[in-house]
């Protein structure tokens, strides 16, 4: 079992030079997350339909229900996945329940274009073939071979994660993404507790220096500190020093501990005022 788990571990090099080890989501976990999301979408759609029928009782309820189904299904399948994965957790409700998230394979920021590409591809993979089969059945031109072709098309794409080592579906290949197990610590209180007041006073970071990075990079810094790899610590310390214009004092670990603690406190204070800097590219934070 441990050997199988290790086969799913991949290295990701962040733009700051940190090497992170991520564990890919299994095909079963991905299928489970999609099943949960599909169930949520279906229950939502059924609820909207019953609401429409109740509100429009005695008034062309059949046509109203059909419109609700078509419009609701279109909006849900096109925006449910995209909107949730565009959030800071980069995960739909199903992925959150199974502790999964989407990341960019190049270690950089998960862009809106990548999220849109991976989810629009789902139309080609699953929804369009199934909708075509339903329409063919309703119109009366469906036959056995057409049905086999439609389900075969969908099955090929749905089973694709089983036949590649990175457990990628077609949308992941197109968008350059991975779905990984979310092992990120939420707050990392031990790191804050281990940082002494003297360290913070010693470096006395300015607000401008703390604004150099956002929530995404500070979370990655927490991963680096938890793993405590000397080479990665040295590399990341050098990158941050150059970024904020600090000289090398020879204490890489102490510098990173202090910067992490100060940056976390700075971000939390900003959140109290409703301001959020998601990453170093976010100028609206």
Image (spheres, rainbow, N blue to C red):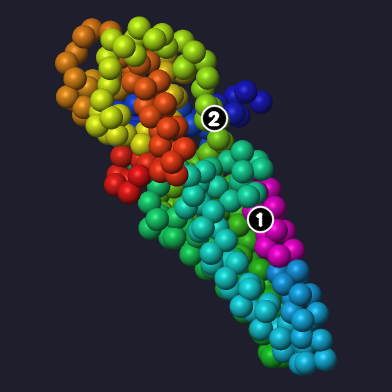
Measuring 19% from the left and 20% from the top, which residue is drawn there? 246
Closest to the observer, 229 or 265: 265
Q: Which residue is drawn at 55% across and 47% down?
A: 91
Mark pair 2, 1: CA separation? 24 Å
Residue 71 in picture, x, y percent from top left: 61, 78
281 vs 136, nearest the viewer: 281
Image height check: is 204 above or below 157? above
Residue 226 lies, in percent from the top left, at: 46, 18
In the rendered image, the residue lying farthest to the front is: 273
Residue drawn 41% across the image and 8% down it:
196
x 63%, y 61%: residue: 155
Q: In which quarter of the image is the C terminus?
A: top left
Q: Kindly state the secondary structure of the residue where label 1 is placed.
A: helix
Q: Nearer the viewer, mark 2 or mark 1?
A: 2
Q: Give the range drawn in magenta.
A: 29-44
Q: Name the residue under label 2.
A: 186
Identify the disc placed on residue 37: 1
């Amino acid at each position: 079992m441990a050997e199988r788990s290790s086969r799913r571990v991949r290295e990701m090099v962040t733009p700051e030079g940190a090497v992170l080890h991520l564990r890919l989501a299994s095909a079963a976990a991905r299928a489970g997350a999609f099943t949960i999301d599909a169930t949520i979408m279906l229950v939502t759609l059924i609820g909207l339909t019953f609401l429409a029928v109740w509100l429009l009782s005695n008034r062309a309820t059949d046509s109203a229900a059909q419109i609700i189904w078509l419009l609701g299904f279109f909006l849900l399948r096109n925006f449910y996945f995209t909107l949730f994965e565009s959030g800071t957790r980069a995960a739909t409700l199903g992925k959150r329940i199974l502790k999964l998230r989407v990341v960019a394979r190049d270690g950089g920021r998960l862009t809106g274009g990548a999220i849109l590409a991976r989810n629009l591809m789902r139309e080609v993979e699953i929804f369009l073939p199934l909708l075509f089969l339903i329409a063919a059945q309703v119109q009366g031109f469906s036959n056995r071979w057409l049905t086999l072709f439609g389900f075969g098309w969908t099955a090929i794409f749905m089973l694709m994660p089983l036949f590649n080592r990175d457990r990628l579906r077609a949308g992941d290949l197109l968008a350059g993404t991975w779905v990984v197990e979310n092992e990120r610590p939420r707050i990392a209180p031990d790191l804050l507790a281990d940082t002494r007041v003297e360290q913070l006073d010693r470096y006395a970071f300015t607000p401008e220096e703390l604004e150099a990075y956002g929530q995404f990079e500070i979370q990655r810094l927490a991963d680096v500190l938890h793993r405590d790899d000397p080479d990665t610590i040295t590399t990341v310390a050098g990158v941050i020093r150059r970024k904020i214009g600090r000289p090398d004092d020879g204490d890489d670990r102490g510098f990173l501990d202090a910067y992490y603690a100060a940056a976390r406190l700075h971000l939390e204070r900003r959140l109290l005022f409703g301001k959020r800097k998601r990453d170093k590219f976010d100028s609206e934070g």
